Image (cartoon, helix red, strand yellow):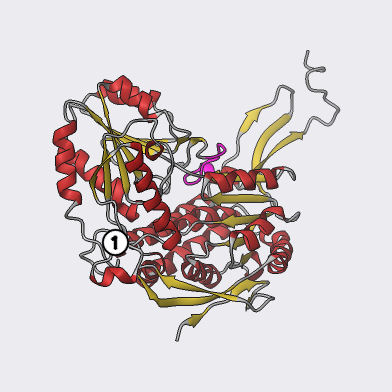
């Protein structure tokens, strides 16, 4: 019998007020029910926000190093439960077990990074322009944070948001993706076991419309952190912006890997295989465009097609599997729809381009890794985010054309170039319009202590990861201490 899960609101595990539920199923085997979850609505959100609001005044007064100790304990518990939760994550969202272990490890790394930042929430001390006066800044918590996370990194991305939110003294209302609610529940269990006050972390399951939008519009939610599509990000920006909420949006991508004629082709091949087909292409940083110099185009394409044809599809719990399923039926239909668009646009289908339904694969939502060659930059498959295992290959004559092509989309998240020319590498760093650039590495591979985010329609300028996310989740307070014993007027008495 499937496990029944609940919301966590006001320090208790509870059903939704409506009593309605939804099923969470394994995308590799749709017959397997991972769990049954509450289908929540605005009433549940309101109770969660009230709980977080009550907890804020006490949690904000806990010294940041003590909050950091709780984050460390959460990391320790995650280490102990790493394999258990990784296997659950593979069951509910499909990616191979090596990747869900990596997802867990990123959460662990983020926990320990937050632990250290508890003693490093640096401000600035600067000289005053007046005698006997001291100037400094410090970081202050903001209030109740609404955290809305996607399904493709069910542990890593929520930890990117919730650890810094709590570490800086905020309280949290957390809405995970309805495709991956089980992993989110385990994360909240870990926070509670580690010592986060029960009212300070609230978990509300449900859809974007029934839970996500009420979080965004709630007057007592002070800031929003969202990862998802650019289309939804624009809606959130409009709805939250009218109340001047602080908003962090990490949105879509159409990332490209450039391979120049002087590149190490074997290294570049490993990079594009991992970048394009890791997580079944379901990453915001996935390599969806491959830009090849004309001198190595044909040779590299032959190498790539041969390797891709040998990738093994299957249930991600099988250690020998390379590529798992896509997340659900609508996602697979969307991916195949883009493949049909590519055919109609005149691109050459080199590999894949169809559902994978042999043997046990028919139980899930598998799609064969797909390569289009002969793609031009104006084709839709070269411009629009597909979010699946579909790679568009574009031929260019030189470095300048490669940069022009890579910049010719509305997104600017991640980018990659393979070259042995150090001067060309630094020109790429300068000229590529992206928040992230890899030199001789794939477009995926972010590390938790570095800022993560993009430009153009990939986001709104904030960065998660690293020290920058702690800046988002806190306010700067400027402090002046005058110990002169008299009124001193800046810009007047010192001139």
Q: Nearer the viewer, residue 70 or 211?
A: 211
Observer able to see residue 60: no
Q: Is residue 479 above or below residue 90?
A: above
Task: Determine the residue positioned at 74% across, 34% down.
Answer: 480
Q: Is residue 408 above or below residue 462?
A: above
Q: Is residue 260 above or below residue 308?
A: above
- Provide the secondary structure element on which disc 1 rests: helix
Assess whether residue 319 is covered by the magenta stretch. no
Task: Determine the residue positioned at 67% across, 53% down.
Answer: 216
Task: Determine the residue positioned at 69% across, 47% down.
Answer: 239
The quadrant of the rendering that contains the C terminus is top right
Q: Nearer the viewer, residue 61 or 306?
A: 306
- Name the residue beneath numbered marker 1: 98
Please provide percent x and percent y for residue 341: 38, 43
Assess whether residue 465 is covered by the magenta stretch. yes
Observer able to see residue 52: yes
- Magenta portion: prevailing SS class: loop
Q: Please provide the residue range marked out in magenta.
A: 459-468
Please provide percent x and percent y for residue 363: 33, 72
Task: Determine the residue positioned at 64% across, 70% down.
Answer: 40
The quadrant of the rendering that contains the N terminus is bottom left
Give the residue at the far bottom of this rendering. 1
* Count of numbered circles on the image: 1
């Amino acid at each position: 019998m499937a496990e029944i899960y609940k919301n966590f609101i006001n320090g208790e595990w509870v059903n939704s007020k409506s009593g309605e539920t939804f099923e969470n199923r394994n995308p590799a085997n749709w017959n397997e029910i991972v769990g049954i979850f509450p289908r929540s609505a605005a009433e549940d959100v309101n109770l969660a926000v009230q709980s977080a609001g009550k907890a804020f005044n006490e949690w904000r007064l806990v010294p940041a190093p003590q909050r950091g100790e709780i984050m460390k304990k959460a990391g320790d518990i995650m280490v102990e439960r790493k394999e258990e939760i990784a296997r659950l994550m593979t069951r509910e969202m499909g990616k191979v077990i090596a990747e869900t272990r990596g997802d867990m490890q990123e959460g662990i790394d983020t926990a320990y990074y937050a632990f250290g930042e508890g003693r490093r929430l640096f401000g600035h001390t600067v000289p005053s322009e007046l005698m006997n006066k001291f100037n400094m800044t410090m970081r202050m918590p903001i209030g109740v944070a609404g955290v809305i996370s996607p399904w493709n990194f069910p542990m890593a991305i929520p930890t990117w948001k919730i650890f810094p939110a709590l570490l800086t003294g905020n309280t949290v209302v957390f809405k995970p993706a309805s495709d991956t609610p089980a992993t989110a529940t385990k994360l909240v269990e870990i926070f509670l076991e580690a010592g986060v006050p029960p009212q300070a972390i609230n978990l509300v399951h449900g859809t974007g419309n029934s839970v996500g939008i009420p979080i965004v519009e709630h007057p007592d939610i002070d800031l929003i952190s969202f990862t998802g599509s650019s289309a939804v990000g624009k809606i959130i920006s409009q709805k939250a912006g009218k109340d001047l909420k602080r908003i962090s949006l990490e949105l879509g991508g159409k990332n490209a890997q450039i391979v120049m004629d002087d590149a190490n082709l074997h290294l570049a091949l490993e990079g594009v295989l991992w970048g394009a087909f890791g997580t079944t292409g379901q990453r915001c940083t996935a390599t969806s465009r491959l830009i090849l110099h004309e001198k190595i185009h044909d040779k590299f394409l032959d190498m790539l097609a041969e390797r891709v044809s040998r990738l093994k599809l299957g249930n991600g719990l099988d250690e020998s599997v390379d590529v798992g399923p896509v997340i659900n039926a609508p996602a697979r239909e969307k991916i195949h729809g883009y493949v049909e668009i590519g055919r109609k646009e005149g691109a050459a289908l080199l590999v894949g381009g169809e559902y994978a339904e042999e043997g046990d694969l028919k139980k899930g939502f598998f799609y064969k890794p797909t390569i289009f060659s002969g793609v031009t930059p104006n084709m839709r498959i070269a411009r629009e985010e597909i979010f699946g295992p579909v790679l568009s290959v574009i031929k260019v004559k030189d470095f300048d054309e490669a940069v022009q092509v890579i910049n010719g989309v509305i997104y600017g998240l991640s980018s990659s170039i393979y070259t042995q020319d150090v001067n060309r590498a630094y020109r790429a760093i300068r000229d590529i319009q992206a928040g992230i650039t890899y030199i001789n590495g794939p477009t995926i591979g972010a590390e938790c202590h570095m800022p993560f985010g993009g430009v153009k329609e990939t986001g709104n300028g904030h960065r998660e990861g690293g020290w920058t996310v702690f800046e988002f989740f806190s306010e700067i307070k400027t402090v002046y201490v005058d110990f002169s014993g008299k009124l001193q007027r800046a810009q007047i008495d010192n001139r």
